Image (tube, rainbow, N blue to C red):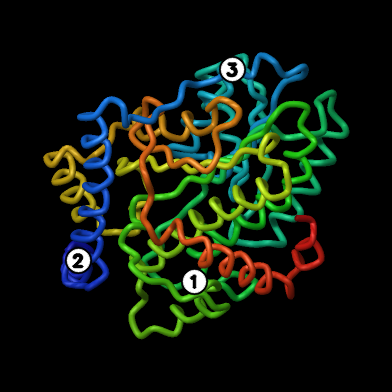
C-alpha cells in the first residue's frame, strides 16, 4: 500500500512538472510535424524522396556492422535483420549478461548469424577507446578484412535524474551525443579502410525540433550547466543531445565532402519516430501507458517494424546517399529542423566538442580527422 501511494505521488509530481508538459506538448507537435511532411510529400508524387536498399553482395569478405545499444529494442532488432543480410554484426553494450542473452536471442532467430559482442560504456570516452583497441585486435586475429562497413550509433537514454560520468559530463548528453562523436572519429580509419564504400548511421529523434535556439560552449556541450539546475531539465537535455547528434552528422558529411572522401564514407541519420521501447522506463509506468495510448489514437505511434525500418533504410541505402534524414520507413526521407542545418552552428559544435575532449584520454586522437 505504501509503495502504491509512493508511485501515485511520483506520477502526480511528474504530471505537474514543466519537463513532462514539455514532452506532452512539444514532442507531440514535433512528431506530428514530421508525419505532416510525409503526408504533404505524398500528395505531390514528384516531391517524394525515397531510397531503395542495397545488398552487401559485392564485398569480397563478410561485411562488418558495428551497432551500439543493441541489447534491446530497436538496436536488437536492427542487429538481427542485418545478420540476415549477411553482415558480421558487432554488438556493443554495457552489460556482459545482456550481451550474452542478446547473442542467444539473435542465434535463436537466425542460427547462421555471425556475431561478436564487446562490452563498452558509450558514455565514457575511455571505455570507447578500449573497445576500439579490442575491435582492431579482433579483426587482425580473424580472417576478416580489417575494416568496418557500417557503424550504427544507436545507444541512447532518457534519464529523468542527473548523473555524472567519470569525465564529469552529464550522462545523458555523454551517451546520446559525446559517445557517438568519439566512437565515430575513433572508427573512421576502419571505415576508410573498407574496400567498398562504408556508412555511418546516427539514430536521432524528432524531439530535436523542440529546440529553437542553441548555446554552444563547453559547459553546455558537456551538460555541466544543466547539472547546476535546481530541477533537472531532462526533456530539454534529451532534445539538445539529439540536435547535437544531427549537427555533428551533417558537419561530418560536409567535412568528408571537402576532403574528397564523400565517395567513400556516407553519413546519414535515422529517426524511428515514436516507438514503444524501454527508453521511457524512468517515466512512471502509468504515464507512459497513457502517452502511448494517446499517440496511438492520434496515429503518431509507429509500429516496431516501421520504426526499425528507418534505421535499416539508412544502413542499406545505395552508395552515394549521404547527409539524408530517414523517417517513416519505406526508404522515405524528410527535412530536419532549420536549426539542425545551420552550418556555422555545426562547425562551432564540432570545435567545442573537440576542445572539450582534448583534456581526456581521447585528446591525443582528436587530430585523426
Give the spatial CA distance, label 2 vs label 1.
22 Å
215 up-or-down from 75: above or below: below
In the rendered image, the residue lying farthest to the right is 141
Indicate the position of residue 138 as horizontal and vertical percent values: 81, 36
Where residue 174 sits: x, y (%)? 55, 64
Tell me which numbered mark, 2 or 3, is placed earlier along the sequence: 2
Report whether residue 267 is seen: yes
Q: Do tag 2 and tag 1 residues touch (Cβ < 8 Å)?
A: no
- Residue drawn at (23%, 39%), measured in percent from left and top? 301
| Label of residue 163 in the image | 1
223 above or below 110? below
User: Quick one: label 3, few (<14), some, or many (20+) residues within 10 Å?
Assistant: few
Q: Quadrant of the C terminus?
A: bottom right
Crowding near pointer 1: few (<14 within 10 Å), some, many (20+)?
A: few
Instruction: Say whether residue 43 is left or right of residue 97.
Output: left
- Left or right: 296 as drawn, with respect to 196: left
Residue 357 lies, with reference to residue 53, above or below; the image says below
Q: Earlier in the sequence, mark 3 or mark 1?
A: 3
At label 2, counting other C-alpha atoms closer than 10 Å, the crowd grade (few under 14, some 14-19, many 20 or more) is some
Quadrant location of the N terminus in the rendered image: bottom left
Which x, y percent locates residue 287? 19, 56
Q: Residue at x 49, y 71 (%)?
A: 163
* Residue named by callout 3: 55
Q: Residue furthest front?
A: 46
**Disc 1 element:** loop
Q: In front: mark 3 or mark 1?
A: 3
Secondary structure category for the residue under label 2: helix
* Residue appearing at x 15%, y 43% in the figure: 293
The x, y position of residue 182, in whole percent, is 66, 57
* Tag shown at residue 21: 2
Amino acid at each position: 500500500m505504501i509503495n502504491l501511494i509512493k508511485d501515485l505521488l511520483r506520477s502526480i509530481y511528474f504530471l505537474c512538472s514543466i519537463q513532462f508538459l514539455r514532452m506532452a506538448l512539444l514532442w507531440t507537435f514535433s512528431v506530428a510535424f514530421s508525419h505532416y511532411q510525409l503526408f504533404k510529400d505524398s500528395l505531390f508524387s514528384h516531391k517524394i524522396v525515397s531510397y531503395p536498399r542495397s545488398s552487401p553482395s559485392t564485398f569480397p569478405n563478410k561485411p562488418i556492422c558495428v551497432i551500439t545499444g543493441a541489447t534491446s529494442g530497436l538496436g536488437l532488432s536492427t542487429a538481427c535483420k542485418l545478420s540476415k543480410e549477411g553482415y558480421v554484426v558487432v554488438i556493443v553494450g554495457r552489460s556482459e549478461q545482456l550481451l550474452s542473452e542478446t547473442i542467444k536471442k539473435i542465434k535463436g532467430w537466425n542460427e547462421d548469424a555471425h556475431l561478436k559482442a564487446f562490452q563498452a560504456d558509450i558514455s565514457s570516452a575511455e571505455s570507447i577507446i578500449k573497445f576500439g583497441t579490442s575491435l582492431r585486435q579482433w579483426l587482425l586475429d580473424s580472417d576478416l578484412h580489417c575494416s568496418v562497413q557500417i557503424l550504427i550509433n544507436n545507444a541512447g537514454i532518457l534519464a529523468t535524474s542527473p548523473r555524472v560520468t567519470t569525465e564529469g559530463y552529464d550522462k545523458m548528453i555523454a551517451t546520446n551525443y559525446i559517445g557517438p562523436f568519439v566512437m565515430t572519429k575513433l572508427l573512421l580509419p576502419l571505415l576508410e579502410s573498407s574496400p567498398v564504400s562504408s556508412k555511418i548511421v546516427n539514430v536521432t529523434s524528432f524531439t530535436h525540433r523542440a529546440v529553437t535556439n542553441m548555446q554552444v560552449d563547453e559547459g553546455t556541450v558537456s551538460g555541466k550547466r544543466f547539472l547546476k539546475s535546481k530541477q533537472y531539465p531532462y526533456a530539454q537535455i534529451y532534445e539538445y543531445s539529439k540536435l547535437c547528434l544531427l549537427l555533428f552528422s551533417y558537419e561530418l558529411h560536409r567535412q568528408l565532402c571537402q576532403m574528397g572522401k564523400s565517395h567513400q564514407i556516407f553519413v546519414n541519420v535515422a529517426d524511428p519516430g515514436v516507438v514503444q521501447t524501454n527508453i521511457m522506463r524512468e517515466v512512471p509506468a502509468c504515464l507512459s501507458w497513457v502517452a502511448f495510448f494517446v499517440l496511438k489514437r492520434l496515429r503518431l505511434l509507429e509500429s516496431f517494424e516501421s520504426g526499425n525500418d528507418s534505421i535499416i533504410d539508412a544502413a542499406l541505402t545505395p552508395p552515394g546517399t549521404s547527409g539524408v534524414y530517414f523517417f517513416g520507413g519505406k526508404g522515405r526521407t524528410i527535412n530536419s529542423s532549420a536549426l539542425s542545418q545551420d552550418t556555422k552552428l555545426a562547425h562551432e559544435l564540432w570545435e567545442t566538442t573537440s576542445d572539450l575532449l582534448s583534456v581526456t584520454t581521447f585528446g591525443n586522437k582528436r587530430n585523426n580527422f
